[in-house]
C-alpha cells in the first residue's frame, strides 16, 4: 500500500510533505478510498469559530470502504474474531463477506423500524460482534450512533439519550463479565423512564437472563432480523455528515457529545492504524479496549476494518478465569499486534510473571499502549515479559476529540524511549505554549500541548452546543486547539505527555471530570459541599479522592462514606466511585471563595507537609484538620 511508511527517513520525508502541503498530502492518502464523488477542496478551516471541513463536498459511505470494497479482495478472510468471556465457549469468526451480510441485514431491519438518516441511535451493549454490527448498520443508513459504555448507570445513560434525543436504543439482556452476570436491559428500562425520544429498543439475547420485554416498544434482535434481506445499498453521505457522537467528560459537570464526521475520520483512522501498528495483510490484531470508548471505535472497528485487517473483539476481563487470559488469547489466535492500557499492564504485573510463563507469545510483533502515561516500570515489564524484548512498544497519545492517534512511534521504525509517545504522526502540527500563550520553540521545553493546524479526524463540534466546543478547546489559546495536557519536548525533540493540566483526572485510562464526580456526591442529602481531586494510584494511574463536608446528623462516618460512594455509583457508574472519601470540617478556600484544589491535591498525594504558604487562605485552620484525617 502506497500510504505505508517503511523507514525513519520515510517518516521524516512524509512528515515534511504533510506540513508543507497538507492538501496534496491528504488528497493522495484519500485517493485510495472509494468515494461516490470526489471532494472539491481538501480542507477548509478556521480555529476561531471554529469551523473545520475536510474533503469538502465529497460523497461516500464509510461502510462501503469497510465492507463492499473488501468483498472481492478478501471476502473470505476473517474481519472479526470474537473471543467470549468464558474460554469454554466457542469463539466466533466473521469473514468480511459474513460481516457485510449481517450489517446489511441489520441496517435494513432498523430502517424498517423507522430509523432514518441523521437519527440518533444509542448502543448500550457488551463486547459482542453485534455491537460492531450495530455501529456499522447505523453508518450504513446514515444514522448517527452514540455508544454508551455499558458500565455507566441508568442516570448517566438517560442524560446521554436526552442530550442527543435518540430515537432507538440497541442493547442486550445482560452481560457476562468475568464471573459476574450484569443486568443491562434492566438499566435501560430504568433510564428510559426519563426519556421521551426513544421509540423502540432492540434487545440482543446474550445471557438468557429474565428481563421485561414491553410489547410495542422492545423487540428481540433475532426477531427484528427475521426474514430481512442481506442486501442493502449504502446511503450516500457527505464528508461532513455526522458519523457518530461520543460523550466524554471535561472540566465542567456535564459530559459533552464529541462529534466526528464521515470523510476525515475514515481517512485518518485507516492511515494511522496501518502506520502506527505496521499492520501487514494476514496479521491478527487485538485491541483490548471497550467499544464504548474512542479506542474501541477507532482501533477495534473503524481503522482496522477499513484497512482490511482481522480484528479481535474480546468480551471478558484480563483476570478471568485467571491472570493469564490475555496471553492465552494471544497464543490461541496467534495475535501479531496487541494494544492495551497501562492500567491493565500494571494490574497484571501485580500477579508476577507466573501467569505468563505457560504461554509462548511468539506470534507477537508489536505492543501498543493507550489512555494514560505509561510509567517506566510498566513499560519495561511489558517490553521484557510480554514482548520478550523483541517487540517495539507504541505508546500512543490521543483523545476522544482527536479521533485518532496523534503522537506515537511507528512500530519498528521510530526508536522508542520508555514513557515517551515520541513523535507526531504526519499531518499533526504540535506546538507547546506557555500559560501566556507564547510558543516555546526548540527542544528541552515544557508547557501546554496545542495543535495549530487541523487534522482529518478532529472533532467538529460538541453536539447541540457549538459554543461549548469553542470555549473548551479553542479559547484558552486563540487560534489553537488546546488538548488539556501538559507536555515536555526533550533534548531529542521527543514528546512526553505529563498528564492533564485541567480539572480532569484519568482513572484507569478513563477520563473523569472532577466537577462531574462532585455533582454526583452532592446529590446525597447529607452532603453540604465537596471537592474531588486525583492522586497517584499504583494500578489505576490516578485514583479519585473526595473531600466532603457533611451534615452528620448523628450518623457514623463509616456508614455515611459508604452511602455517598453508593450515590456516585448510582449516578455515574462504578468507574466514578471515589477510591478515598474523607469527611472534613471545611474546604480550604481563597478569600473570594474559590476552593484551593492545589492544596487538596498535595494532601491527597501524601505531600501535606509541603504546602507552601497558606496564610492567604480565608480559612487556613481547616488545612491542619484535613491533613490529620487524610489517607487514613
Ligand atoms: C486523555 C484522553 C485516546 C484514547 C483513550 C483515552 C490521556 C491518552 C495517552 C498516552 C499519556 C495519554 C491524556 C489525554 N492519554 N493516551 N499515550 N500517554 N496520556 O481517551 O478518554 O479521550 O482521554 O488521556 O491525558 O488527554 P480520552
Image (cartoon, rainbow, N blue to C red):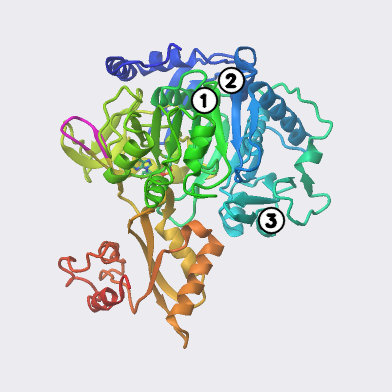
Q: Label 3: which residue?
A: 192
Q: Residue at x 47, y 88 (%)?
A: 554
Looking at the rendered structure, the secondary structure element under dot 3 is helix
Left or right placement of residue 418 versus residue 51 in this view: left
Compute the Cα span from label 1 to label 3: 32 Å
Q: Nearer the viewer, residue 96 or 470?
A: 96
Badge 3 residue CB within 8 Å of ligand 1: no
On screen, residue 477 above or below 44: below
- Secondary element at image label 1: helix
The image quarter containing residue 195 is bottom right
Q: Position of residue 137 (x, y in %)?
A: 67, 32
Q: Is residue 69 above or below residue 287?
A: above
- The answer to whether residue 262 shows anywhere in this view is no
The residue lying at 19 percent from left, 66 percent from top is 611
Q: Is residue 533 left or right of residue 337?
A: left
Query: Residue 312 in the image: x percent, y percent?
Result: 55, 33
- Labels 3 & 2 near each other (Cβ < 8 A): no
Counting from the top left corner in percent of width and height, residue 333 is at 54, 31
| Classed neighbour count for the residue bearing mark 3: other residues with Cα under 10 Å, few (<14), some (14–19), many (≥20) | many
Q: Quadrant of residue 475?
A: top left
Residue 494 painted magenta: yes
Picture quarter with ligand 1? top left
Nearest-to-viewer mark from 3 and 2: 2
What label sits on residue 65 in the rendered view?
A: 2
Task: Report the span colored magenta.
Answer: 489-496
Amino acid at each position: 500500500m502506497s500510504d505505508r511508511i517503511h523507514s525513519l527517513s520515510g517518516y521524516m520525508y512524509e512528515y515534511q510533505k504533510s506540513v508543507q502541503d497538507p492538501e496534496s498530502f491528504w488528497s493522495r492518502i484519500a485517493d485510495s478510498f472509494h468515494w461516490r464523488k470526489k471532494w472539491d477542496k481538501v480542507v477548509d478551516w478556521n480555529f476561531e469559530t471554529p469551523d473545520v471541513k475536510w474533503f469538502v463536498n465529497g460523497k461516500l459511505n464509510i461502510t462501503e470502504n469497510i465492507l463492499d470494497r473488501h468483498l472481492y479482495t478478501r471476502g473470505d478472510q476473517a474481519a472479526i474474531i470474537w473471543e467470549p468471556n468464558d474460554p469454554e465457549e466457542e469463539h466466533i469468526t466473521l469473514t468480511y463477506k459474513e460481516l457485510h451480510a449481517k450489517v446489511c441485514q441489520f441496517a435494513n431491519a432498523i430502517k424498517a423500524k423507522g430509523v432514518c438518516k441523521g437519527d440518533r441511535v444509542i448502543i448500550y451493549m457488551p463486547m459482542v460482534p453485534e455491537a460492531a454490527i450495530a455501529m456499522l448498520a447505523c453508518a450504513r443508513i446514515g444514522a448517527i450512533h452514540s455508544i454508551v459504555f455499558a458500565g455507566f448507570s441508568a442516570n448517566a445513560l438517560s442524560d446521554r439519550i436526552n442530550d442527543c434525543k435518540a430515537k432507538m436504543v440497541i442493547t442486550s439482556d445482560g452481560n457476562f463479565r468475568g464471573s459476574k452476570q450484569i443486568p443491562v436491559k434492566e438499566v435501560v428500562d430504568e433510564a428510559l423512564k426519563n426519556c421521551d425520544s426513544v421509540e423502540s429498543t432492540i434487545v440482543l439475547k446474550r445471557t438468557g437472563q429474565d428481563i421485561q420485554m414491553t410489547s410495542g416498544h422492545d423487540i428481540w434482535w433475532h426477531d427484528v432480523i427475521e426474514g430481512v434481506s442481506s442486501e442493502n445499498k449504502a446511503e450516500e453521505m457527505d464528508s461532513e455528515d455526522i458519523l457518530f457522537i461520543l460523550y466524554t467528560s471535561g472540566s465542567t459537570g456535564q459530559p459533552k457529545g464529541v462529534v466526528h464526521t464521515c470523510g476525515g475520520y475514515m481517512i485518518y483512522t485507516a492511515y494511522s492504524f496501518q502506520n502506527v501498528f505496521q499492520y501487514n495483510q494476514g496479521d491478527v490484531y487485538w485491541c483490548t479496549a471497550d467499544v464504548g470508548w474512542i479506542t474501541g471505535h477507532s482501533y477495534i472497528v473503524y481503522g482496522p476494518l477499513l484497512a482490511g485487517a482481522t480484528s479481535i473483539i474480546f468480551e471478558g476481563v484480563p483476570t478471568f478465569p485467571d491472570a493469564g487470559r490475555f496471553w492465552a488469547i494471544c497464543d490461541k489466535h496467534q495475535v501479531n499486534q496487541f494494544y492495551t492500557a497501562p492500567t491493565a499492564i500494571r494490574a497484571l504485573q501485580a500477579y508476577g510473571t507466573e501467569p505468563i510463563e505457560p504461554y509462548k507469545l511468539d506470534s507477537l510483533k508489536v505492543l501498543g499502549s493507550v489512555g494514560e502515561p505509561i510509567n517506566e516500570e510498566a513499560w519495561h515489564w511489558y517490553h521484557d515479559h510480554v514482548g520478550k524484548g523483541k517487540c517495539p512498544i507504541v505508546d500512543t497519545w490521543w483523545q476522544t476529540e482527536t479521533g485518532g492517534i496523534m503522537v506515537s512511534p511507528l512500530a519498528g521504525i521510530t526508536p522508542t524511549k520508555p514513557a515517551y509517545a515520541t513523535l507526531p504522526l504526519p499531518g499533526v502540527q504540535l506546538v507547546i505554549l506557555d500559560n501566556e500563550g507564547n510558543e516555546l520553540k526548540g527542544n528541552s521545553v515544557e508547557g501546554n500541548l496545542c495543535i495549530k493546524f487541523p487534522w482529518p479526524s478532529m472533532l467538529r463540534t460538541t453536539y447541540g452546543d457549538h459554543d461549548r466546543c469553542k470555549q473548551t478547546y479553542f479559547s484558552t489559546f486563540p487560534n489553537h486547539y488546546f488538548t488539556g495536557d501538559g507536555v515536555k519536548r526533550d533534548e531529542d525533540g521527543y514528546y512526553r505527555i505529563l498528564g492533564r493540566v485541567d480539572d480532569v483526572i484519568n482513572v484507569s485510562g478513563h477520563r473523569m471530570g472532577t466537577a462531574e464526580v462532585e455533582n454526583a456526591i452532592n446529590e446525597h442529602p447529607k452532603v453540604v459541599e465537596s471537592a474531588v481531586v486525583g492522586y497517584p494510584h499504583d494500578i489505576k494511574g490516578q485514583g479519585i479522592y473526595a473531600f466532603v463536608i457533611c451534615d452528620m446528623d448523628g450518623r457514623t462516618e463509616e456508614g455515611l462514606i459508604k452511602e455517598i460512594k453508593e450515590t456516585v455509583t448510582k449516578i455515574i457508574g462504578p468507574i466514578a466511585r471515589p477510591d478515598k472519601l474523607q469527611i472534613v470540617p471545611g474546604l480550604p478556600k481563597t478569600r473570594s471563595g474559590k476552593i484551593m484544589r492545589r492544596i487538596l491535591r498535595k494532601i491527597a498525594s501524601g505531600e501535606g507537609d509541603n504546602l507552601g504558604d497558606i496564610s492567604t487562605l480565608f480559612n487556613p485552620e481547616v488545612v491542619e484538620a484535613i491533613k490529620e484525617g487524610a489517607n487514613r
